[in-house]
Image (tube, rainbow, N blue to C red):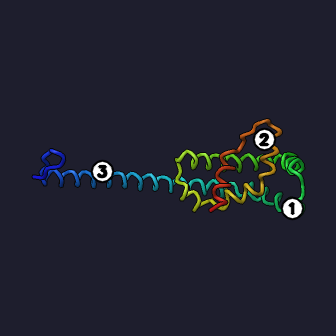
Amino acid sequence: MLSIAGFAISLADVLGLIVTIVGIWLVVRQLREAKLASQMGGMMELRQMISDNSEFERLLFDLISEDDWEAISAKEAHARLFNSDELTEAWNELTSFFELYSLLVRKKALDEGMAYAYNGKFVSLWWKRLEKIARQQRIELKWGDLLENWEWLALKFEKK
């Protein structure tokens, strides 16, 4: 028998407590691994979504690859994008994906490290190239926090 602060504790009680703590730790670890496995499955589905929309991606890539893209104003970039139904649809698909993806990371439903490993460079790259359109869209729609989750994640990933 061990006496701690006036309480008598047997060696069996101490061992039982240790076994309980280890058991709880193992269960928490399994739950975390199951969550990560579930997220991996979700990440694979998201990757499939991206490749399914590769035509949209190509359209936007062609737009941002134009020689004068860096030099034109946000207003001109916005006009070029929204003067084409195909580009507008591509914009809506891409921004919806990145905003949802970023929201899942922000709300911790998706592991940040895993999100960075899978799409971190794309999140930042696309934001950097389309930021002027997003900012102009905020002005046009009078919606100051439009795409704020994507911006938040892109800036966070850019620092890594």
Residue 59 to residue 108: above or below? below
Circle 2 Cα neighbour tier, 10 Å, few/some/many (<14 / 14–19 / ≥20) = some
The residue beneath circle 1 is 66
The residue beneath circle 2 is 138
Answer left or right for 153 relative to 23. Answer: right
Q: Nearer the viewer, mark 3 or mark 1?
A: 3
Q: Are marks 3 and 1 in contact (CB under 8 Å)?
A: no
Front residue of 11 and 90: 11
Whole-Å distance between the Cαs marked 3 and 1? 57 Å
Q: What kind of residue is marked 2?
A: Arg
Q: Are marks 3 and 2 in contact (CB under 8 Å)?
A: no
Element carrying mark 2:
helix
Front residue of 149 and 9: 9
Count of marks, rendered view:
3
Residue 24's tag is 3
Element carrying mark 1:
loop
Circle 1 Cα neighbour tier, 10 Å, few/some/many (<14 / 14–19 / ≥20) = few
Q: What kind of residue is marked 3?
A: Ile
Quadrant of the image for the C terminus?
Answer: bottom right
Label 3 vs 2, first from the N-terminus: 3
Residue 7's tag is none
Label 1 vs 2, first from the N-terminus: 1
Answer left or right for 104 relative to 65. Answer: left
Whole-Å distance between the Cαs marked 3 and 2? 48 Å
Picture coordinates of residue 148, whole percent (x, y): 69, 45
Q: Residue furthest left?
A: 1
